[in-house]
Image: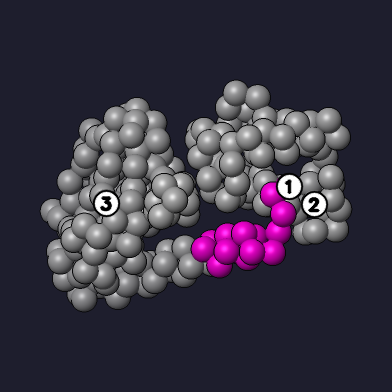
Amino acid sequence: MNLTYLLRTCKLFSDLNRHDLEAVEQIAISKEYRKGGIIFREGEPSRGFFLVVAGAAKIFRTGPDGRERVFHVVESGDAFAEAAMFMDTYPAMAEALVSPTTVIQVDKNGFKQLIARDPRLSFKIIGTMVNWLRQMRDALTDLTLKEVPARLASYALSLPAEPGKPIKVNVSKTTIAQMIGTTKETFSRVLNRFAQHRILTFRGTQLRILNRARLEKIAGGEEKI
């Protein structure tokens, strides 16, 4: 598939004109990974940032106890590792969650030259980094101040949804448990409680919010179950 077309499907470059896209294309390559494929490892020299054009990837670190802490899941249209543009090494790992996962790697040095010539790209990169920092701040607040049901409620409310329709979740329940800082067993118990109270169900890849008002109260700490 045409690389210029793939670049345009990503939010970071969606409003660039053809000339600008072709300039980015000169410093970009497309790569495909199977589920479990490592896109980069923590401590590996930073060689650029990435755009997901199909599939999904998780950004995570492994603690001393061997447990994974998932910081973020990136899906089609999203960029990741932008901060590594200004770092010598990657601060975490990135792994493909589904087969196939297709990413575009944008060369670090080449992109720095582009943004030096075009301030618009600088502002877009800054914008995505600010958004990422906000997400990390919110995730840290949830982990330190909220109990597991409130964390799960916050996660469910963050998903894009259409009224009356189920939400398709492309990542495993194990990954979601890691994202909200709990075990798979605790996650399953909390899901059962949500289902029993007819607040939320999660079967297969389909998540349904049955009572958004109560879910919002749980996420905000106004109600406990």
Q: Nearer the viewer, residue 20 or 158?
A: 158
Inspect the image, locate mark 3, and give the three-letter code of the amino acid beneath it: Arg
Quarter holding the N terminus? top left
- The structure residue drawn at horizontal position 35% and vertical position 38%, both measured from the top left corner, is 96
Which residue carries the number 3 mark? 41
- The image shows residue 202, relative to residue 69, as above or below, that is above
Dot 2, crowdedness within 10 Å: few (<14), some or many (≥20)? many
The quarter of the picture where residue 191 lies is top right
Indicate the quadrant containing the C terminus: top left, top right, bottom left or bottom right. Answer: top right
Name the residue rendered at 73%, 47% in the picture. 149
Residue 21 vertical placement versus 116 (above, below): above
Relative side of 178 to 129, left or right: right
Q: Range of the magenta residues?
A: 135-149
Residue 178 vs 196, above or below: the answer is below
Image mark for residue 149: 1
Circle 1/circle 2 CB separation < 8 Å = yes
Image x and y of residue 58, in percent: 41, 45
Amino acid residing under circle 1: Pro
Place of residue 130 in the rendered image (x, y in percent of width and height, measured from the top left): 46, 70
**Can you identify the residue that label 2 sits on?**
218
SS at mark 3 in the image:
loop
